[in-house]
Image (spheres, rainbow, N blue to C red):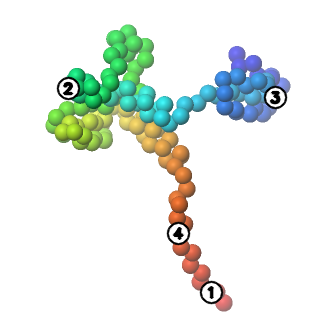
Amino acid sequence: MLGLNGTSHEFSVVYGSYPGQDAKIAVLTRSMLQVMIDFASCIEVPEADIAEGRVYSAQRTAEQIRSFPPLITVHHGAAPPDDADASVRYRNQWFWIDDRDPRSKHHMAFLMIMFSLTEGAPTQNAPVVTVPAR
């Protein structure tokens, strides 16, 4: 299926859509921006914000939702949520991930791990203290 060399015991993973050699596996990854855009498309937004042009909301059919379920479900409402795993207030609205939604919690944790992996090194190193030893 992958067109790999059956006698090889080692394979290189390379970026791209075509490996070019039978000892390489090509992987076409997404940027963090693309991942965030995919996640953002699953956020429930107030109808007033859509009507005022503050936000774009992709309308999906029931068949599309069944075929491609949302990666994460972020609810919204005027009142603070009772049982949220994470919540934030923005423009007098509350947005949250329900604590009883393991799929959304899992994907949010994955996103946070990916962000931590892409963070750069701290710009300032801790001071070095030298203690003389005898």
Where residue 67 sits: x, y (%)?
43, 13
Quadrant in which the N terminus appears: top right
Q: In this view, does 99 lie above or below 25?
A: below
The reply to whether residue 100 is visible in this rendering is no
Residue shown at the point (62%, 86%) measured from the top left: 132
Of the image marks 2 and 1, the number of the one nearer the N terminus: 2
Quarter of the figure with residue 42: top left
Q: How crowded is mark 4: few (under 14 residues within 10 Å), some or many (20 or more)?
A: few
Residue pointed to by mark 4: 126
Tell me the element at label 2. helix
Of the image marks 1 and 4, the number of the one nearer the N terminus: 4
Residue shown at the point (24%, 32%) measured from the top left: 76
Where residue 70 sits: x, y (%)?
39, 23
Depth check, mark 2 against mark 1: the one in front is 2
Residue shown at the point (75%, 28%) measured from the top left: 24
Quarter of the figure with residue 16: top right
Q: Distance between the residues labelled 1 and 4?
A: 19 Å
Quarter of the figure with residue 7: top right
Q: How crowded is mark 2: few (under 14 residues within 10 Å), some or many (20 or more)?
A: few
Q: What residue type is labelled 3?
A: Ser
Q: How crowded is mark 3: few (under 14 residues within 10 Å), some or many (20 or more)?
A: few
Mark number for residue 132? 1
Residue shown at the point (38%, 9%) measured from the top left: 63
Tell me the element at label 1. loop
Of the image marks 2 and 3, the number of the one nearer the N terminus: 3
